Image: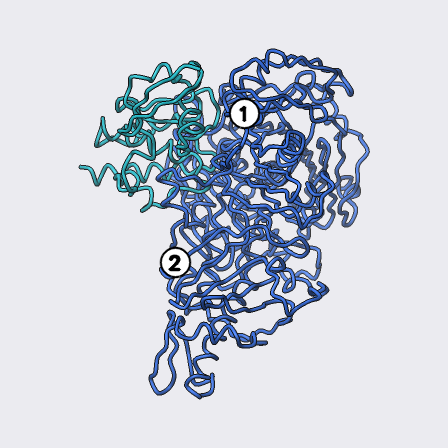
Chain colours: A blue, B cyan
Amino acid sequence: MNTSYKRRTFIKASTLTGGGLLLGVNFMSSCKEDVVPPVDMASLDFKDFNAFLKISPEGYATIYSPNPEIGQGVKTSMPMIIAEELDIPWEKVNVVQGKLDNENYQRQVAGGSQSIRLGWDPLRKTGAAAKQMLINAAAKRWEVDPSECSASGGIISNKAGDKLNYGDVVSEAAALEVPEEVEFKDPKDYKIIGTDVSNVDIDELVTGKPLFGLDYKAPGMAYASVMRPPAFGQKLASFDDGAAKAVAGVQEVVQIGDKIAVVADNTWSAMKGKNALKAIWVTDTKGENSADHDRILNGLLDSGKMEVFREDGDVEKAFAEADEILERTYESPFLPHNCLEPMNFFADVTADKVKLVGPIQTPARTAQSIAETLGRDIKEVDLEMTRMGGGFGRRLYGDFADEAARISDAVKKPIQVVFSREDDMTDGIYRPASKYRFKASIKDGKLTGYHLREACVNANMYGLIPNFFPAGAVENYKVEGGKHESNITIGAWRAPFTNFLASAEQSFFDELAELMEVDPVQMRLDLLDKVKDTEDERIQYSAERMQEVIKLAVAKSGYGKSKSGTHQGFVAYYCHNTHVAQVADVEMEDGKPVVKKVVCAVDCGIVVNPLGALNQIEGGIVDGVGHALYGDFGFKNGVPTAKNFDKYRLIRMKEAPEVETHFVKNSLSPTGLGEPSLPPAGGAIANAIAKATGKRMYKQPYINSELLG
Amino acid sequence: MPSYNLSINGESKNVDVSEDTPILWVLRDQLNLVGTKYGCGIAQCGACTIHMDGNPVRSCQLTVAQVADKKLTTIEGLSADGSHPVQKAWKKIDVPQCGYCQAGQIMTAAALLDSNPSPSDNEIKNAMNGNICRCGTYNRILGAVKEAAGKLS
């Protein structure tokens, strides 16, 4: 298949001193039509590019992986895509984490499960363009037409049987024009995509080599432990740092806004120094309690001010005419992210430059923000991304990088800010507490109306979600939401809003099917039939793809035919462009339901790296099940109710269900996997528990229920 | 500050740190052995697991004074080159997602197999349950421990 693109704004090539070809690709140029190209195209400024491909005269490829690696595997899978179209053996590929190198265009972001989906075209084009240039160079040397040549596995051949290695012609290739049109491989010819490829960092990870932000060290670096307001709504009135300064190893103490930074020779001294600070805090806005939130969110659901996100038909009329109504409310608490590597960042602010190193999901935005904070030109800011011990959305926010920069600027030293677990868990930016109230009407055995109300702290579901299922499947449909403004900070948490909404919604549908006395799977398939061939452009999901994953999950799990003692719960969900269906197996042990296994069917189009993909699906399910079962967090007078793993429970190996994953095989463009398997998992186990015990779970964490506690 | 002679991965190291410094931070900050990780500081997560005289311990809760006369092994010393059967199993199964917990997981697994070369699934789960994996690679960890056990027997 051929494809053309805006050549000049998209890929640039250069010869490397010492030989070799360097190609740069700008993602956003290929994604957006209206991106303005850099003024001076002749000078090869690699700050405009997101990804680089370097081919050496020995025929080895160095692929600079553009997007931050948070454990979602893109450092492996994005280079795989380039290598495939380049047609070079994976053994000849070396992957290097790309630095932040673009202020204007790019999406060097880890978030929203979009890296593969948005990178699919640009990464293929980069590989294919490089391959064509190598072919063109060989053809020129042989004095034949390029159409008489082909390339495979790093070797170019012509009709006469002559062969050249990529390395033989790479310097000549670098001087050639980047081709306007390139051919992509047919998926059936893939040699790398679709094969199991190990994590590119596996050797370093199993031997403890420095990879993470917290592992970063620089000469003369000092460590900073920061005291922040213990309750939301507080400000710093005054502090006494005498005892802190007396701690061996502490160098100095500096106030940064409402925070106090203790700077020391090493992490332990910094933490000890911080614990020795005496601070007086004053209440600026009232500290909130979970009991308040409960009351306020209920009030919002009952009669609060709501914004309508989508409305089709007339739900009130449907309810007035209904034979039966089902109304249910589901609740979930705030959740901290708890990346296992706590927040940390390195900054060295000097007169010449601002050097930043650490784990961050949004390097470009963070660099820009710090430049503005310090009043520096963005060109003076250099940001290097380390591997991250988990992101989950927490590291989208560069607050910790901002702290490091401010402290370094204040004390004029290279600084690494290190959060203790307590700092990390109490600092904010939580998954917001939320409640969902569903109301559905049944008439003549059909679902006629569906009304969803969301009450949430500080935010409401984002624009696409009201156009997920069951939008389009119910004639009278209304989704609205209201929020409570709070001084507790919230942020994106793996699969924002859907991470609880999906479970609530899928539980509601399960109960609805029970009320209607229909099989939940058949009910879902029938509803989806109504959305096939829809002309409603707002609908985000595909009814056909949803039906296919449902059928696959049912087939592989034996749903409806489970053996005695195994109770199964079914869910199906679309989010982040990917469709999943799950069946959870629950057994009763000592009178309590135990989750034994989850079977998951996934349609994410082409699976780039099956080995990595399976890990993402399994991880998402364990994450979803774990937080639905155990994640418990609240506030008393603005102070979080837990600050470490003694009081805050994360799922452990003994509790983790077995996961069995099946991918729908098709050749559709790949979509993301970092988030999609998580949202409905809690609903799958709730539905299974309902089968096992007859009891429905309306409140997370489920461990607090009488049934499980 | 007092001075301590330590035995780390078969080598003698001398450090000047306050007596109450957890050996975790001595390893990471003074000795530049960053394979052992900080996750919680209260021995709940296992990321800091090292071997003390062959037994798995939480380095965040042991002070430098407490370990001064013990033989300590960290992830860096488990093998010279990543060739310990547990490390090889971890590679074969491709266990890690973010990878932050994995050094601690490997150390716990290696200690388990040292004392129990053919553990049952339940024995593995019981031994490994103290190590949190936030990314949820538990099924792969189980598979890798069994793979390593299979190679050892």
- What secondary structure is marked by label 2? loop
Q: Nearer the viewer, mark 2 or mark 1?
A: 1
Taking depth in this image into account, of B135 and A46 the one nearest to the observer is: A46
Looking at the rendering, which quadrant does residue B1 occupy? top left
The residue at which mark 2 appears reads as: A195
The residue at which mark 1 appears reads as: A420
Answer with left or right where residue A373 lies relative to residue B147. right
Q: Note whether residue A46 is visible.
A: yes
What's the chain of the residue with tag 2? A
Q: CA distance from mark 2 to mark 1?
A: 40 Å
Other residues around mark 2 within 10 Å, as few (<14) / some (14–19) / many (≥20): some
Q: Amino acid at mark 2?
A: Thr
Q: Earlier in the sequence, mark 2 or mark 1?
A: 2
Other residues around mark 1 within 10 Å, as few (<14) / some (14–19) / many (≥20): many
Answer with left or right where residue B110 lies relative to residue A250. left
Residue that appears at 72% across and 19% down: A236
- What secondary structure is marked by label 1? loop
Q: Amino acid at mark 1?
A: Ser
